[in-house]
Amino acid sequence: MRSRCGRRAFRVSPIRCVGERIMATGVPEFREVAWRACVYGLSVVYAYMEKSGLKKALLLNGETRSKVYSAKDRMTAFIFGDAGIAALIERDEKYGESYFSLNSDGSREALIKINGGGYRTPSSMETIKEKVVDEHGNIRSDEQGYMNGADVFNFVIREIPKDIKEMLKYSDKHKAELDYYVFHQANNYINSYLGKKVKFDKDKIPSTICKFGNTSSVSIPLTIISELKDSLKEEKELLLCGFGVGLSWATSIIKFKGTHISDIVEI
C-alpha cells in the first residue's frame, strides 16, 4: 500500500503477465484494483460485474511488504509479512445483496508513505542513501516505507467504528445477524479495541497477526482462508473492514455461499 506516485515494478502491467500465463483472452483486465485494501478491489469487481453482465471474475491480490521497509527500522521491520491470494468471484441472484462503504482522507497521506523513488521524487543517490531518522537510531532511506503508528492508531479509533455503525444502519443489519467480523490485521491491540468499541462478540473476530504479521491488503482474505475455511462450508454473512495508506478505509457486508477454499501454500 504505497502513496508514492507512478513507479512501476514492471515496464508492462503485471496483470498482463498473469493474463498471458493463464491464456486469458477476450476478457477485460484491471490492475491494482486492490492496492488500497481487498475491500476496494471487491467493490470494483462487484460493480463492474453488475453493470457489464459478466458472471465470473478473478481477483488477484499480492503484497511483498517485507521488501518495502528497512530491516534497520525497528518501528516497522518486524511487523509486515508477504502474501497473495486468488479469488474467483461469481455473480448470481441467489447470493443476495452486498454492501460497500469506501472512504479516503488525502490530508493524512503522510502518515504511511514512501517519499522517494517515484515520479515526484525520482531515484537518486540521495534517495537510496540510508539515514538515521530518529533519536532511537532507526535507519532507512527515502525509498523505504515509514509509518506514524500513533497517528494511524488515532485515525483508526476515530473513523472505523463510525463507518461500521453507518454500514450496519445503511444495510439494515444488526451486528448479531452477522457470523464474523474480519478486520485488516494491523495489530492485535487495534483489532481488540475496535471489537470493544462497536461491541462485537470477540469470538466472531478471527485473527492471524501472530501467524503471518501484517500482510497489508491481503490480510483480510488471508484471515478468511486461514481461520474460516471450515465455517464457510455453510452459508455465512461477514463484515469486512480494511484501512491503511491514503489514508483510506472501507467496510463491506458480503454473503458467502457455496464457498470453496483451498489450502494455504507456504513458500
Image (cartoon, rainbow, N blue to C red):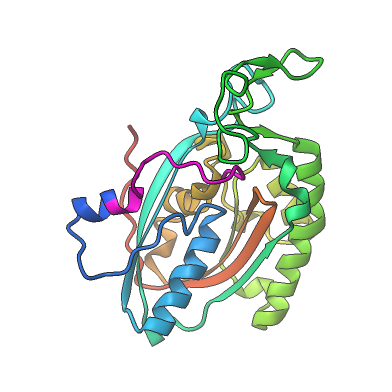
**In the foreground, 5 or 74:** 5
**In the foreground, 104 or 149:** 104
In this rendering, the answer to whether 78 lies above or below 91 is above
Instruction: Name the quadrant containing residue 127.
Output: top right
Residue interval drawn in magenta? 1-16
Name the residue: 58% across, 43% down: 2
Q: Position of residue 145 (x, y in %)?
A: 62, 32
Q: Position of residue 217 (x, y in %)?
A: 53, 49
Specify the farthest residue to the bottom: 93
What is the count of numbered marks?
0
In this rendering, the answer to whether 144 lies above or below 43 is above
Name the residue: 66% across, 58% down: 249
* Residue 3 among those drawn in magenta: yes
* 55 on left or right of 41: left
Name the residue: 27% across, 49% down: 17
Q: Position of residue 136 (x, y in %)?
A: 78, 15
* Residue 134 among those drawn in magenta: no
| Main SS class of the magenta portion in the image | loop
**In the foreground, 121 or 76:** 121
Q: Position of residue 38 (x, y in %)?
A: 51, 57
Name the residue: 78% across, 65% down: 162
In this rendering, the answer to whether 212 lies above or below 138 is below
Which quarter of the rendered picture does the N terminus lie within?
Answer: top right
In this rendering, the answer to whether 200 lies above or below 236 is above
Which quarter of the rendered picture does the C terminus lie within?
Answer: top left
